[in-house]
């Protein structure tokens, strides 16, 4: 069997190989360059798109912020308007309530003053007919006696007096315990100050009323105050425990 003959590469074959290699290298480099250019273009495109998205996002954010600000402004205006309307309504209701309360107070005060006047009229006429408080006979009787000396001023509903005694009658449509305390302290003190001409007189006290409860009656008896009640067209006097002040 014959051995194959070894073929030595020729210069031309070597050059052909080198030429093909160089062309493949050139093609590869061009492909790399193309890919790099495309990648650069894509990056620029991506950056531009990102900038555009960022711009759109910023515009949307500003738009949303402006809309939110406008909604807040409208809300604040509505809140202030509602608050002003509420305050106006509150003041209106308060003013109407004040007027109604004033009317009620005037009506009640008118009734109270009228009742007080009628009570004074009733007891004054009854006492003027007898001029007596218990067993004590008086010469004179006065109604709503008033005097003012320096800072002391007072008015006494009914006053009866003679040569040795004075009777002060406090008239109430409805008697209360605080009226008794006021009578035995303030009224006595003021009378002594305002009428020094009666300094040597015995001073007697009476409470006259259209309405008594047991607590007031018991308190008056303990304090030595005469009790004058309505009895038909006259008055009933409870002076058993009455004492001089």
Image: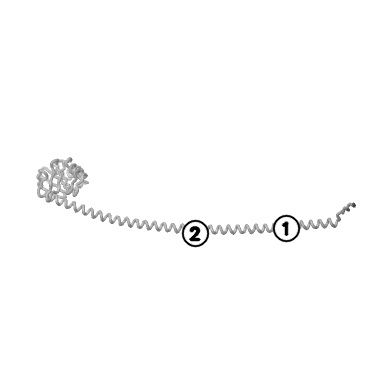
> Secondary structure under badge 2?
helix
State the mark number for residue 31.
Answer: 1
91 vs 73, left or right, is left
Residue 234 screen position, x and y as percent:
11, 49
Splitting the image into 4 quarters, where does residue 85 fall? bottom left
The reply to whether dot 1 and dot 2 touch (C-beta < 8 Å) is no
Front-most of 197 and 98? 98
> Extreme right residue here?
2
Residue 67 screen position, x and y as percent:
49, 59
Front-most of 187 and 211? 211
Residue 21 screen position, x and y as percent:
79, 56
Q: Is residue 148 visible?
A: no
> Secondary structure under badge 1?
helix
Residue 82 screen position, x and y as percent:
39, 57
Q: Which quadrant, please, contains the C terminus?
A: top left
> Extreme front residue here?
1
Q: Is residue 42 visible?
A: yes
Query: Which residue does the numbered mark 2 point to in the structure image?
Result: 67
Q: How far apart in space, not on screen, are marks 1 and 2 (Cα)?
A: 52 Å
Taking the spot 19% from the left edge, 52% from the top edge, the residue there is: 115
180 vs 5, left or right, is left
Q: Please rate how many residues cluster around mark 2, counting C-alpha atoms within 10 Å: few if below 14, some from 14 to 19, many from 20.
A: few
- How many numbered discs sit on the rendered protein? 2
- Mark earlier in primary sequence (1, 2): 1
175 vs 58, left or right, is left
Splitting the image into 4 quarters, where does residue 221 fall? top left
């Amino acid at each position: 069997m014959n051995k194959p003959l070894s073929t030595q590469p020729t210069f031309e074959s070597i050059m052909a190989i080198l030429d093909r290699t160089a062309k493949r290298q050139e093609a590869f480099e061009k492909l790399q360059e193309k890919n790099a250019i495309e990648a650069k273009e894509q990056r620029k495109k991506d950056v531009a798109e990102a900038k555009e998205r960022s711009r759109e996002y910023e515009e949307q954010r500003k738009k949303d912020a402006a809309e939110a600000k406008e909604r807040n402004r409208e809300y604040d205006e509505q809140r202030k308007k509602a608050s002003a309307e509420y305050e106006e309504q509150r003041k209106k209701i308060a003013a109407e309530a004040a007027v109604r309360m004033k009317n009620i107070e005037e009506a009640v005060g008118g009734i109270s003053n009228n009742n007080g006047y009628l009570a004074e009229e009733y007891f004054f006429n009854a006492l003027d007919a007898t001029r007596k408080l218990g067993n004590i006979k008086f010469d004179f009787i006065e109604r709503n006696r008033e005097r003012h000396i320096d800072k002391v001023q007072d008015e006494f509903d009914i006053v009866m007096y003679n040569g040795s005694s004075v009777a002060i009658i406090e008239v109430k449509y409805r008697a209360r315990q605080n009226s008794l305390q006021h009578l035995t302290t303030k009224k006595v003190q003021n009378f002594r100050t305002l009428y020094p001409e009666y300094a040597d007189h015995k001073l007697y006290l009476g409470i006259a009323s259209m309405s008594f409860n047991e607590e007031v009656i018991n308190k008056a008896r303990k304090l030595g105050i005469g009790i004058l009640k309505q009895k038909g067209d006259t008055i009933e006097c409870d002076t058993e425990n009455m004492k001089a002040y």
